[in-house]
Amino acid sequence: METSRKPHFVLVPWVGGVSHIVPMSDIGCLLASHGACVTIITTPASVSIVQSRVDRASRQGAVIAVSAIPFPAAEAGLPEGCERMELIPSPAMVPSFFKANKRFGEAVARYCRQQDAARRPSCVIAGTCHTWTLPMARDLGVPCYIFHGFGAFALLCVEHLYKQGRHEAIASADEPVDISVLPQPFECKILGRQLPLQFLPSMSVGSGLMQEIREFDVAVDGIVVNSFDELEHGSTALLEAAAGKRVVAVGPVSLCCGAPSLDPPRRDDDARRCMAWLDAKKAGSVVYVSFGSAGCIPPAQLLQLGMALVSCPWPVMWVLRGADSLPDDVKEWLRENTDADGKCLVVRGWAPQVAILEHPAVGGFMTHCGWGSTLESVAAGVPMVTWPLFAEQFVNEKLIVDVLGIGVSVGVTKPTENVLTAGKLGSGEAMAAEVGAEQVKRALERLMDGGSEGEEMRRKALELKEKANVALQEGGSSYSNLEKLIESSV
Ligand code: UDP
């Protein structure tokens, strides 16, 4: 392709979370590996996360520019450096974060308009909540795609909920809502309280902002998803029809640079320790446990989970967030029952998740069903034990367990609080342990005990791994979707 005719994609990942910054950086790497020019714009606190992904792709010849534009946290009343949502000290500051994000958007728009003709964007891919990208793209006369961070199945459920309002018909949050969006036999129901955040009665971002975000979602020109068509049971095409816009599945993006890197954004020593620990374990024997980049479960629940993990017969690698703020008795219990070398390794830093899932020793993944983790597990062929916390994770659980048949549900029915719902789910109840240690162990056994149920899930997971790899190879569905996206942006 002639350099002068190369389309220039400008990607602005949602600044709020690592789990948006990582896959959008990988999408940038994929576009560059297909010959497009790419610029990824982020904030100073997150630039190293983007750069670590980009450096891997650059070693394979891709050329990607990374720009860090200041995030005016202090101006909006946030602590200096508060540039991601997990850094917000209190839920009351969530609106300030969105205020700072608006000003960040003004600076990004100025930056894009000032580029000379050769660096002018030809397509913008916006992170979710970056509503300001749409007027910017319109002004530049280029298409604006959105990356929500959800899979197509969950986005389809969300679209149906908005259009059909089935959630409005329930009298209480304990009642089921029918979210069946796929043809028979895939019936799907979740409880009112398990609905994605935008359908919960009150949140710390407020209804005005939610409305603005929805209007943005409706107005964009297309949706880019980290998924592959073969995984979605037709959801991609159904979403295109329901949303009335192009849906481009380009994943699994974690496979963008071949073998997983051992360079996580921070704590290289932790990463090496994890891999050395896995090297000493038997193939398929380890349960890897993680609740994503920010997920914390309440202390009482954590104790029940811990008791199951230390007493089950399999070695466990457990990524634990927020361990420093746990009550003293839970800290004490962890000190006495987990250790660095033996049965249950607790990782307090940033685990190299993609590399861990790819390691032959890992036989199962206990996950919060975040879409990034779900897809990384699929790409590695690892079946799951599902423990959704909030947002669209209960919907993802349905896909994993009921549609794809590659996971066992622990049986959580109540969402866990997070910075967007803190204090709004019914305080005392939200802190209690819903799932006992025995229940957790039963779910682990179903997946890990070598019986026919677990082995069938393993077989299906390995089949999907194969399909995931084919999707990104020349002629595969995600490969072709990327090519078409680039062609349509020239
Ligand atoms: N992740 C990681 N190491 C950790 C925790 C998380 O690499 O210790 C990565 C994980 O591989 C995934 C992302 O963080 O890419 C989490 O995204 P997901 O959508 O699963 O969940 P979220 O963090 O949004 O809840």
Image (tube, rainbow, N blue to C red):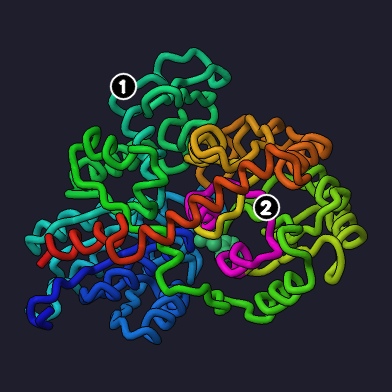
In the rendered image, which residue does mark 2 sit on?
364
Is-magenta flag for residue 353?
A: yes
In the rendered image, which residue does mark 1 sit on?
164
Q: Can residue 15 be seen in this view?
A: no
Which region of the structure is painted magenta? 352-378
Q: Is residue 248 visible?
A: yes
The C terminus sits in image quarter: bottom left
State left or right for residue 267 relative to residue 327. left
Badge 2 local density, few (<14 within 10 Å), some, or many (20+)?
Answer: many
The tag earlier along the polypeptide, 1 or 2, is: 1
Q: Looking at the image, is 240 positioned above or below residue 120?
A: above
Q: Which of 98 and 259 is in front in this view?
A: 259
Return the mark for residue 302: none
State left or right for residue 166 relative to residue 121. right
Q: Looking at the image, is 202 positioned above or below residue 366?
A: above
Q: What element carries label 1?
A: helix
Q: Which of 286 and 413 is in front in this view?
A: 286
Q: Does the residue labelled 2 lie within 8 Å of ligand 1?
A: no
Q: Nearer the viewer, residue 146 or 215?
A: 146
Q: What element carries label 2?
A: strand
**Quarter location, residue 29:** bottom left
Pinpoint residue 317: horizontal percent, then vertical percent: 74, 61
Pinpoint residue 424: horizontal percent, then vertical percent: 56, 34
